[in-house]
Amino acid sequence: MTQSLTGNLLVASTELDGEVFARSVCLVVHHDDDGAIGLMLNRPLHPQPAELLSLLGSEHSRVPAAAEGTVHFGGPLSGPVVALHALPALAESETSSGIYVAAQKDHLEKLMHQAAPMRLIVGHAGWASGQLEAEIAEGSWHVTPASPEIIFSPDEAMWARSIRHASGRTLARWVGARPVPSPELN
Protein backbone atom coordinates (compact mmCIF):
# COMPACT_ATOMS: atom_id res chain seq x y z
CA MET A 1 0.00 0.00 0.00
CA THR A 2 1.51 3.35 -0.99
CA GLN A 3 -0.82 5.61 0.98
CA SER A 4 -4.10 5.37 2.83
CA LEU A 5 -7.22 6.28 0.88
CA THR A 6 -9.18 7.01 4.06
CA GLY A 7 -11.21 10.19 3.57
CA ASN A 8 -11.32 9.86 -0.21
CA LEU A 9 -14.21 9.05 -2.48
CA LEU A 10 -14.27 6.09 -4.81
CA VAL A 11 -16.32 7.01 -7.84
CA ALA A 12 -17.42 4.08 -9.99
CA SER A 13 -16.07 4.38 -13.52
CA THR A 14 -18.40 3.95 -16.45
CA GLU A 15 -16.71 0.55 -16.96
CA LEU A 16 -17.87 -0.75 -13.56
CA ASP A 17 -21.12 -2.57 -14.03
CA GLY A 18 -23.27 -4.75 -11.85
CA GLU A 19 -26.24 -3.87 -9.74
CA VAL A 20 -24.40 -3.06 -6.52
CA PHE A 21 -21.57 -0.71 -7.52
CA ALA A 22 -22.56 0.75 -10.92
CA ARG A 23 -22.76 4.58 -10.74
CA SER A 24 -21.89 4.49 -7.03
CA VAL A 25 -19.97 6.94 -4.89
CA CYS A 26 -18.25 5.37 -1.90
CA LEU A 27 -16.49 7.08 1.01
CA VAL A 28 -13.41 5.19 2.23
CA VAL A 29 -13.62 5.24 6.05
CA HIS A 30 -10.71 2.86 6.71
CA HIS A 31 -7.74 1.73 4.62
CA ASP A 32 -4.53 0.01 5.68
CA ASP A 33 -2.36 -2.93 4.64
CA ASP A 34 -5.09 -5.38 5.71
CA GLY A 35 -7.78 -3.93 3.40
CA ALA A 36 -10.37 -1.19 3.13
CA ILE A 37 -13.88 -0.35 4.30
CA GLY A 38 -16.16 2.04 2.47
CA LEU A 39 -19.69 3.40 2.67
CA MET A 40 -21.75 3.86 -0.47
CA LEU A 41 -23.42 7.24 -0.34
CA ASN A 42 -25.93 7.47 -3.17
CA ARG A 43 -28.18 4.45 -2.59
CA PRO A 44 -31.24 5.57 -0.56
CA LEU A 45 -33.36 2.69 0.66
CA HIS A 46 -36.92 2.54 -0.71
CA PRO A 47 -39.07 2.30 1.25
CA GLN A 48 -37.27 3.79 4.20
CA PRO A 49 -36.96 1.40 7.17
CA ALA A 50 -39.58 2.96 9.45
CA GLU A 51 -38.69 0.68 12.35
CA LEU A 52 -35.07 1.87 12.35
CA LEU A 53 -36.10 5.50 12.10
CA SER A 54 -38.56 5.14 14.96
CA LEU A 55 -35.86 3.51 17.13
CA LEU A 56 -33.62 6.53 16.62
CA GLY A 57 -36.25 9.24 16.74
CA SER A 58 -39.16 10.36 18.78
CA GLU A 59 -42.34 12.31 18.16
CA HIS A 60 -40.25 15.52 18.15
CA SER A 61 -37.48 14.34 15.85
CA ARG A 62 -36.98 15.30 12.25
CA VAL A 63 -37.91 11.78 11.11
CA PRO A 64 -41.35 12.51 9.62
CA ALA A 65 -40.12 15.54 7.67
CA ALA A 66 -36.86 14.03 6.42
CA ALA A 67 -37.52 10.30 6.43
CA GLU A 68 -37.43 9.86 2.65
CA GLY A 69 -33.81 9.55 1.59
CA THR A 70 -32.45 9.57 5.14
CA VAL A 71 -31.30 5.92 5.30
CA HIS A 72 -28.90 4.63 2.66
CA PHE A 73 -27.60 1.21 1.60
CA GLY A 74 -23.88 1.41 2.40
CA GLY A 75 -22.83 -1.84 0.78
CA PRO A 76 -23.42 -5.58 0.68
CA LEU A 77 -21.72 -6.36 4.01
CA SER A 78 -23.63 -6.05 7.27
CA GLY A 79 -22.52 -3.77 10.04
CA PRO A 80 -23.76 -1.17 12.49
CA VAL A 81 -25.91 1.77 11.49
CA VAL A 82 -23.63 4.75 11.06
CA ALA A 83 -24.24 8.40 10.38
CA LEU A 84 -22.10 10.72 8.30
CA HIS A 85 -22.63 14.27 9.50
CA ALA A 86 -21.03 17.66 10.14
CA LEU A 87 -21.19 17.94 13.96
CA PRO A 88 -17.88 17.14 15.72
CA ALA A 89 -19.51 16.99 19.17
CA LEU A 90 -21.59 13.97 18.08
CA ALA A 91 -18.82 11.99 16.40
CA GLU A 92 -16.58 9.08 17.22
CA SER A 93 -14.22 9.94 14.38
CA GLU A 94 -13.52 12.35 11.55
CA THR A 95 -12.95 10.63 8.23
CA SER A 96 -12.15 13.73 6.20
CA SER A 97 -12.14 17.45 6.88
CA GLY A 98 -15.62 18.36 8.11
CA ILE A 99 -17.03 14.84 7.67
CA TYR A 100 -17.73 12.99 10.90
CA VAL A 101 -18.84 9.43 11.67
CA ALA A 102 -21.15 8.35 14.48
CA ALA A 103 -22.29 4.84 15.39
CA GLN A 104 -23.14 5.12 19.10
CA LYS A 105 -26.89 5.04 19.67
CA ASP A 106 -26.95 8.20 21.82
CA HIS A 107 -25.11 10.12 19.08
CA LEU A 108 -27.47 8.77 16.41
CA GLU A 109 -30.53 9.71 18.47
CA LYS A 110 -29.22 13.25 19.02
CA LEU A 111 -28.41 13.62 15.33
CA MET A 112 -32.04 12.84 14.46
CA HIS A 113 -32.99 16.05 16.29
CA GLN A 114 -30.47 18.29 14.53
CA ALA A 115 -30.99 20.38 11.42
CA ALA A 116 -27.44 19.66 10.19
CA PRO A 117 -26.90 17.53 7.07
CA MET A 118 -26.68 13.82 7.75
CA ARG A 119 -26.77 10.42 6.03
CA LEU A 120 -27.71 7.28 7.96
CA ILE A 121 -26.06 4.25 6.40
CA VAL A 122 -26.80 0.55 6.82
CA GLY A 123 -24.14 -1.89 5.62
CA HIS A 124 -20.73 -1.29 4.08
CA ALA A 125 -18.35 -2.39 1.33
CA GLY A 126 -15.08 -4.14 2.05
CA TRP A 127 -11.92 -5.03 0.19
CA ALA A 128 -9.20 -7.52 1.15
CA SER A 129 -5.54 -6.55 1.24
CA GLY A 130 -4.53 -5.22 -2.20
CA GLN A 131 -7.99 -5.75 -3.71
CA LEU A 132 -9.02 -2.09 -3.81
CA GLU A 133 -5.65 -1.01 -5.21
CA ALA A 134 -6.04 -3.62 -7.98
CA GLU A 135 -9.56 -2.40 -8.81
CA ILE A 136 -8.29 1.19 -9.00
CA ALA A 137 -5.37 0.15 -11.23
CA GLU A 138 -7.71 -1.68 -13.62
CA GLY A 139 -9.89 1.44 -13.91
CA SER A 140 -12.97 0.37 -11.96
CA TRP A 141 -12.73 3.29 -9.53
CA HIS A 142 -11.64 6.92 -9.74
CA VAL A 143 -10.27 8.42 -6.51
CA THR A 144 -10.96 11.99 -5.44
CA PRO A 145 -10.87 13.80 -2.09
CA ALA A 146 -14.13 13.80 -0.15
CA SER A 147 -15.82 17.06 0.74
CA PRO A 148 -18.97 17.91 2.70
CA GLU A 149 -20.40 19.45 -0.49
CA ILE A 150 -20.28 16.07 -2.23
CA ILE A 151 -21.10 13.88 0.80
CA PHE A 152 -24.30 15.80 1.51
CA SER A 153 -25.33 16.55 -2.09
CA PRO A 154 -28.57 15.12 -3.49
CA ASP A 155 -28.37 11.40 -4.34
CA GLU A 156 -29.43 11.79 -7.95
CA ALA A 157 -26.70 14.36 -8.73
CA MET A 158 -23.87 12.84 -6.69
CA TRP A 159 -22.40 10.36 -9.18
CA ALA A 160 -22.58 12.69 -12.21
CA ARG A 161 -20.93 15.53 -10.31
CA SER A 162 -18.31 13.24 -8.77
CA ILE A 163 -17.40 11.41 -12.00
CA ARG A 164 -16.68 14.69 -13.79
CA HIS A 165 -14.34 15.78 -11.01
CA ALA A 166 -12.72 12.38 -10.41
CA SER A 167 -12.13 11.48 -14.05
CA GLY A 168 -10.29 14.78 -14.54
CA ARG A 169 -8.01 13.90 -11.61
CA THR A 170 -7.46 10.38 -12.99
CA LEU A 171 -6.61 11.69 -16.45
CA ALA A 172 -4.17 14.21 -14.96
CA ARG A 173 -2.49 11.44 -12.95
CA TRP A 174 -2.15 9.24 -16.05
CA VAL A 175 -0.46 11.97 -18.11
CA GLY A 176 1.63 13.32 -15.23
CA ALA A 177 -0.11 16.71 -15.05
CA ARG A 178 -1.46 18.56 -12.05
CA PRO A 179 -5.16 17.94 -11.50
CA VAL A 180 -7.54 20.68 -12.57
CA PRO A 181 -9.18 22.10 -9.39
CA SER A 182 -12.71 22.03 -10.84
CA PRO A 183 -12.89 20.12 -14.13
CA GLU A 184 -16.66 20.58 -14.24
CA LEU A 185 -15.99 24.28 -14.94
CA ASN A 186 -14.10 23.46 -18.16
Image (cartoon, rainbow, N blue to C red):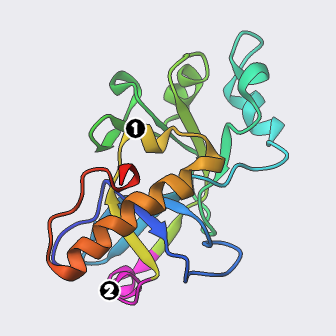
**Quick one: 154 or 69, which is closer to the camera?**
154
Looking at marks 2 and 1 on the same chain, the residue that comes earlier in the sequence is marked by: 2
Q: Is residue 155 left or right of residue 95?
A: right
Res 21 → quadrant: bottom right
Identify the residue under disc 2: 130
Magenta region: 127-139
> On screen, 19 above or below 185?
below
Q: Residue at x 67, y 28 (%)?
A: 56
Q: Looking at the picture, which amino acid does disc 1 mark?
A: Pro
Q: Is residue 37 left or right of residue 69?
A: left
Identify the residue under disc 1: 148
Residue 134, image x and y in percent? Answer: 36, 88
Q: Is residue 125 left or right of residue 6?
A: right
> On screen, 119 above or below 65?
below
- Please say whether residue 51 is visible from this viewpoint: yes
Q: Residue at x 61, y 53 (%)?
A: 42
Numbered disc 1: secondary structure: helix
**Quick one: 35 or 44, which is closer to the camera?**
44
**Quick one: 1 or 183, which is closer to the camera?**
183
Q: Is residue 106 left or right of residue 42?
A: left
